[in-house]
Image (tube, helix red, strand yellow):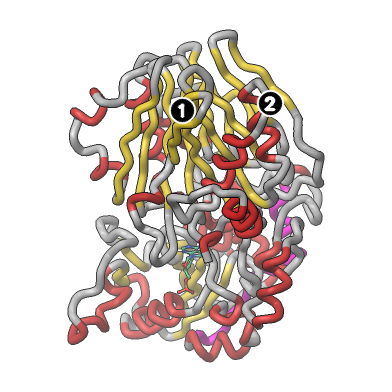
Amino acid sequence: MFDKFEDECGVFGIYGHPEAANLTYLGLYALQHRGQESCGIVASDGVSLRAYRKNGLVADAFRNNEVFDKLPGQNAIGHVRYSTAGGNDPKNIQPIMVDYVRGSIAVAHNGNLVNAQELRNELEQLGSIFSTVADTEVIMHLLARAQSDSLADRVVDALKRVRGAYSLVFLTETRMVAVRDPNGFRPLILGKLDGAYVVASETCALDLIEAEFVRELDPGEMIVVDKDGLHSYHPLEEAKPSPCIFEYVYFARPDSTIFGREVYGVRKEYGRQLAREYPVDADVVVAIPDSGVPAAIGYAEESGIPFELGLIRNHYVGRTFIEPQQSIRHFGVKIKLNPVREVIEGKRVVVIDDSIVRGTTARKIIKMIRNAGAKEVHVRISSPPTSYPCYYGIDTPTRTELIASTHTIEEINRYVTSDSLGYLSEEGLHKATGSCEGGSCEGQFCTACFSGNYPVKFPRLKADKQLGLF
Ligand code: AMP
């Protein structure tokens, strides 16, 4: 189903800087964790757009310096993308760039449109020919058909028809437009560097290029940047904001500030709350790196049990790692992680991770920790059970593959072979996320992956329920 291909992305844009393409490259470097399959930059010199897009990591795709000579101009946008199986066809690499009757336009999209299939069917009936499987291309067709005179109005005309999650950055010959959907599912940050405007999925991208943080775009806000400066609009129908809480749990980088809070502090608070909810007599707290580290530090601080680096990660193994031949496949997770025997041997170990999806990682790691001589292994997860698929831009499997949707916590405990298993409660998650403001943040975030409460409804949800996929 094509609307699963736009999952997990990072976007970046800069307007009015002589080093636009180079800075976009650096911005994408900082956003690499949001997508490792492909990346691309489109630059504008005020007259035309030029694109460079490639499969692979940013460092590899832009290894050759000459690439930047082909991306001249003071304005550029970029994208990093993670796609699910089958989605790594070079055609689908973003930013998408098209020529139409009013010139050229490119777009980088983070999120997932929930009515893309219906719109695509409708547009195909009207004669549109699609060249990618990306839901983002639907926006381009709607934009090309829009009759309004100004670019801003045409973008709004297109976006009034789409539903779901989108943080978008458009680039034309002379303008940059950035928009966040009315629910504000995905982050989008505004910054400034030497008088140039910058937008990025996360603040860590601003930090790298030493841009000043200005503010986050509001849910439903659109900014237009051109030679006259920056203009802000709120042209879309208002909705109750529901930023994605999973950005805090796992997805965003811990050194970023998004949705008004520092990710590191929120993650650490999840660990503290987890220690209050599921204490255990143990000798050492160990994180599954890197995702479990801040929560493990919080758990250790709250419980008084020392935090140690009990698992060491090989940082040179990418997500695209292809397992070697069948006969030596059992190495599996050992290629990525190796236990530190002196930390673990003879100890009662608390192992912290941010989430369990299918359960395979936890199962393998617990086996590894036991083989390193642990006396007991207690698993603590710094978010509630992930029981429902995400339709708003985080890649999760269907409901039947999510272990927490088909098994009880006791069954999961047995499957992953831990001595005990504890998940942060939903109430605890709300309390810990809200703690910076001194209260619970219940109702302020999208927690669909934990609760099944989807803030934006759509036909596929109903269909998936009928198919038992939901
Ligand atoms: P699993 O083996 O399927 O249970 O995967 C669990 C691991 O995947 C945890 O260590 C998580 O940090 C990580 N994880 C959680 N959500 C995602 C996601 N959407 N994409 C990639 N990894 C994830």
Identify residue for label 2: 148
Q: Position of residue 320 (x, y in %)?
A: 31, 62
Q: Which amino acid does label 1 sit on?
A: Ser
Position of 268 compared to 375: left or right? right
Q: Where is residue 9 in the image (x, y as percent from the top left)?
A: 48, 48
The crowding category of the residue bearing disc 2, from other C-alpha atoms within 10 Å (few below 14, some 14 to 19, many at least 20), is few
Q: Distance between the residues labelled 2 and 1?
A: 16 Å
Q: Where is residue 25 in the image (x, y as percent from the top left)?
A: 34, 33
Residue 28 location, quadrant: top left
Q: In which quarter of the image is the C terminus?
A: bottom right
Q: What element carries label 1?
A: strand
Label 1 near label 2: C-beta < 8 Å?
Answer: no
Q: Where is residue 133 in the image (x, y as percent from the top left)?
A: 47, 56
Residue 431 counted in the magenta span? yes
- From this view, report whether residue 254 is shown above or below residue 323: above
| Residue drawn at 53 percent across, 39 percent down | 201
Nearer-N-terminus badge (2/1): 1
Identify residue for label 1: 104
Magenta range: 418-435
